[in-house]
């Protein structure tokens, strides 16, 4: 178990390095080949931080560890709201100026509810996975259209997020480095996590929900805290909502579209409703003064810790 833990931690380190490198490479190459900094920044803010989770889940899916992948996809959403957003708001109140974030939050709740409905019979079929992927295309179109209506300060902040060097050789090098880090990071995590979890008596689903989801989110937590202290509340919330939508619509939808995805009954009864509950708690925070205060951040963190406590209590009770 000690060796598995060491490989797991090394895999997390490689994912963090690869995730940072691939975001810079994608931004630099997109702008070099004609994308505006605003469009590049918008897509990176919304979906860029999801790439490490995507690679881990793809690896888990390929080797037949679907429960681990499913747990990581939905567990990451709970971690995004409860831990990442909560700790960022504790570091500094988050002022939200982007008007499109509230409707995206509603779409996240709808996507979570759709997955519950799809999973009621114990399986997400290929056509249901296809619907989730089409939902992502619709979200992407909505995002690109609505973002152009944002205020100039918001647009400038989004464009500024994408600023990086656009040299071809540098960004190809970044991409190669990212590919190696993400490949080996995902490989070692997927190999080690079940061994690590078995030593604790945890199921593959719980391993995906807790250590994998939390571990892969830690670099994003650090980045969110730094962004909050710089007054970039839109960036923090955009990362959280965009990453969560990507996990449900692309990661889960993509797995199901390739082959029917078995969904444990406990997952439909507990984890997916928990993900929706976190979204519902967050929505009134944004509809009021458009600020997520330190107190509200504390509420999110306490709710997240209570969810972990419930999951562990159920394991001990089982």
Image (cartoon, grey):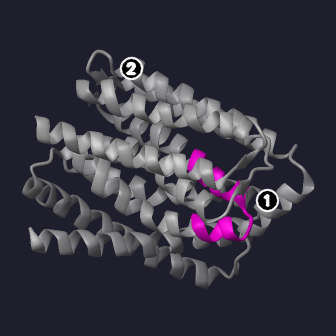
Determine which residue is flagged by label 1: 38
Q: Which residue reaches farthest front?
A: 295
Q: Residue at x 45, y 48 (%)?
A: 302
* Residue 309 appears left or right of 300: left
On the image, the x and y values in percent for residue 196 come to 14, 61
On the image, the x and y values in percent for residue 285 come to 67, 39
On the image, the x and y values in percent for residue 303 come to 44, 43
* Residue 162 appears left or right of 99: left
Determine which residue is flagged by label 2: 118
Note whether 234 is above or below 180 in the view shown. above
In-front residue for pair 304/7: 304
Which mark identifies residue 189? none
In-front residue for pair 120/257: 120
- Can residue 263 be spotted in the picture? no
At mark 1, the secondary structure is helix
Which of the two discs, 1 and 2, labels the residue nearer the N terminus? 1
Q: Which residue reaches farthest right?
A: 152
Q: Main secondary structure of the magenta part?
A: helix
Q: Residue at x 68, y 82 (%)?
A: 167
The image quarter containing residue 195 is bottom left
The image quarter containing residue 66 is top left
In-front residue for pair 97/188: 97
Mark 1 neighbour class, 10 Å CA radius: few under 14, some 14 to 19, many 20 or more: many
* In magenta stretch: residue 212: no
| Highlighted range, magenta | 224-241
Note whether 169 is above or below 106 in the view shown. below
């Amino acid at each position: 178990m000690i060796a598995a833990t060491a490989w797991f931690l090394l895999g997390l380190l490689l994912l963090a390095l690869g995730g940072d490198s691939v975001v810079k490479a994608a931004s630099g190459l997109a702008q070099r080949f004609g994308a505006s900094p605003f469009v590049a920044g918008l897509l990176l803010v919304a979906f860029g931080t999801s790439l490490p989770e995507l690679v881990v889940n793809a690896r888990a899916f390929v080797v037949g560890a679907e429960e681990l992948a499913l747990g990581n996809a939905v567990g990451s959403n709970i971690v995004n709201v409860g831990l990442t957003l909560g700790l960022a708001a504790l570091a500094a109140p988050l002022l939200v100026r982007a008007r499109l974030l509230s409707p995206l939050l509603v779409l996240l709740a709808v996507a979570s509810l759709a997955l519950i409905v799809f999973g009621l019979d114990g399986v997400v079929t290929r056509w249901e996975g296809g619907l989730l992927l089409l939902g992502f295309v619709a979200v992407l179109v909505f995002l690109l259209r609505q973002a152009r209506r944002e205020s100039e300060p918001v647009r400038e902040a989004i464009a500024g997020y994408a600023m990086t060097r656009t040299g071809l050789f540098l960004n190809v090098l970044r991409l190669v480095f990212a590919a190696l880090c993400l490949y080996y990071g995902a490989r070692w995590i997927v190999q080690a996590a079940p061994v690590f979890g078995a030593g604790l008596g945890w199921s593959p689903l719980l391993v995906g929900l807790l250590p994998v989801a939390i571990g892969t989110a830690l670099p994003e937590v650090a980045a969110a805290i730094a962004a909050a202290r710089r007054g970039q509340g839109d960036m923090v919330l955009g990362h959280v909502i965009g990453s969560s939508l990507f996990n449900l619509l692309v990661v889960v939808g993509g797995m199901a579209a390739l082959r029917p995805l078995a969904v444990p009954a406990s997952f439909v009864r507990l984890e997916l409703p928990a993900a929706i509950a976190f979204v519902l708690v967050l929505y009134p925070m944004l509809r009021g003064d458009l600020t997520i205060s330190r107190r509200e951040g504390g509420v999110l963190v306490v709710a997240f810790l209570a969810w972990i406590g419930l999951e562990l209590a159920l394991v001990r009770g089982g």
